[in-house]
Amino acid sequence: MKKKILALVLALVMALSLAACGNSNTPATSGSASGSGDEPTLSGDLVLYCTMTENDIQALLDCFNEVYPDINVEVVNGSAGELVTRLQGEASNPVGDLVWGGMGDSDGMKNADVFEAWVSAHDAENANGWTSPNGLYSMDHLSTVCFCVNTELEAELGLNIQSYEDLLDPKLEGKIIFSDPNSSSAAWNNVSNIMAVYGNDSEEAWTYIEGLMKNLVIAGSSSACFKSVQQGEYVVGLTYEDGAITLVKDGATNVAVRYPSNGTSATVFGCGLVKNGPNPENAKAMIDFICSAEGQTALAAAQQGTLRYTNAGYTAPEGAWLKPSSEIKWVDRDVEYLTANKDAILEHWNNLLAEVQG
């Protein structure tokens, strides 16, 4: 999906987003990407490649254009794999300027061919060591693994889905939707969490995955893993909290967001500056905005708290839709191991899926 968003459209955005983004929390950095505090002087075009939800994208456009009204932003939405493939195909004549979302902390240097070795100064402000793992990504948010459950279909089957083991019930054959971890950062996030729960590359982990595969349907997109659940096509989607909780925020009454009772974890995701992109200063300005405490506070307010951010100085809004971190059982994830062994894990996954599903 590709759509052109002009600054003039700002008059039509939701009143809540305008209120959130028009307050004093909006950063006054914007004469340059360095955050000098000057009045905004940047103008022209900016092409954003993005894996985020429509809710996230709209919040960014609203808030960013409050600070940079003269930058016209064009959005190209897709999965992480799709966007990286597109960047590789455009390498001799880049079209995109930056990528937001899908660039995860276990990617290593695999995308060094398409991203500049540039990181926002705000990356150093992140809490809990959530800083750039490779000098290519400026880290800005967490994507936490969850189950998106259609509670009506769950009740019809007489199930109460809380744990990973609950997903092995024969009643769920063909009723669990998942995306492809080879191309979907959300799916790889889920595989990574299974490894964290059962042990990296352990026999227990692969035995569990083999059983799970008997019930899985592999979707063509990450968003299908929550949207199709709400639409009644599947009972469960293995997904990420941002997409699933946005359905609830928007009024879905047949969806529950549940964190595996065995434990959950999160991928830290970031932005990447496209190598030789046509509008680098505008791109740096957007990345700086996304990574700053002020920008993240404004975004979180506009989104109504559907995304967890990384900057130690950001403030979550009152009445955030996400479950407080203190109420979630967390497990540790070995990012270094996942980075070093991602290709091998995916190869094992692909071979096993072929054996189980034919």
Image: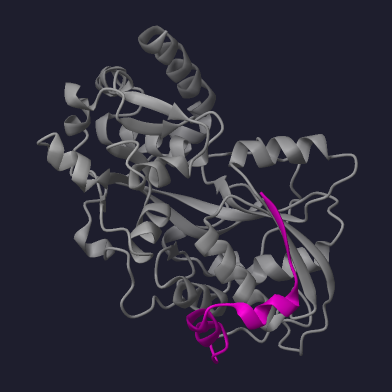
Q: Is residue 193 above or below residue 16?
A: above
- Residue furthest toward the left? 158
Residue in view at x 62 percent, y 47 percent: 134
- Residue 275: x and y in percent read 80, 49
| Residue 77 in the image, given as x and y percentages of width and height | 64, 50
**In the rendered view, would you say 246 is above or below 151?**
below
The reply, left or right, for residue 289 in relation to residue 326 is right
Say whether residue 62 is left or right of residue 185.
right
Q: In which quadrant is the C terminus drawn?
A: top left
Q: Choose between 305 and 328: the one closer to the eye.
A: 305
Query: What residue do we see at 37% from left, 57% from top?
Result: 247
Q: Position of residue 347 (x, y in %)?
A: 50, 17
Residue 333, located in which quarter of the rendered image? top left
Q: Is residue 94 visible?
A: yes
Left or right of residue 307, residue 210 in this image: left
Left or right, residue 216 beside residue 283: left
Residue appearing at x 22%, y 63% in the figure: 326
Q: Nearer the viewer, residue 42 or 37?
A: 42
Tell me, yes or no, whether the highlighted magenta stretch contains residue 15: yes
Give the image location of residue 186, x and y in percent. 46, 42
- The residue sitting at 46% across, 35% down in the picture is 188
Q: Which of the 4 image quarters holds residue 90?
A: top right
Residue range (magenta): 1-25
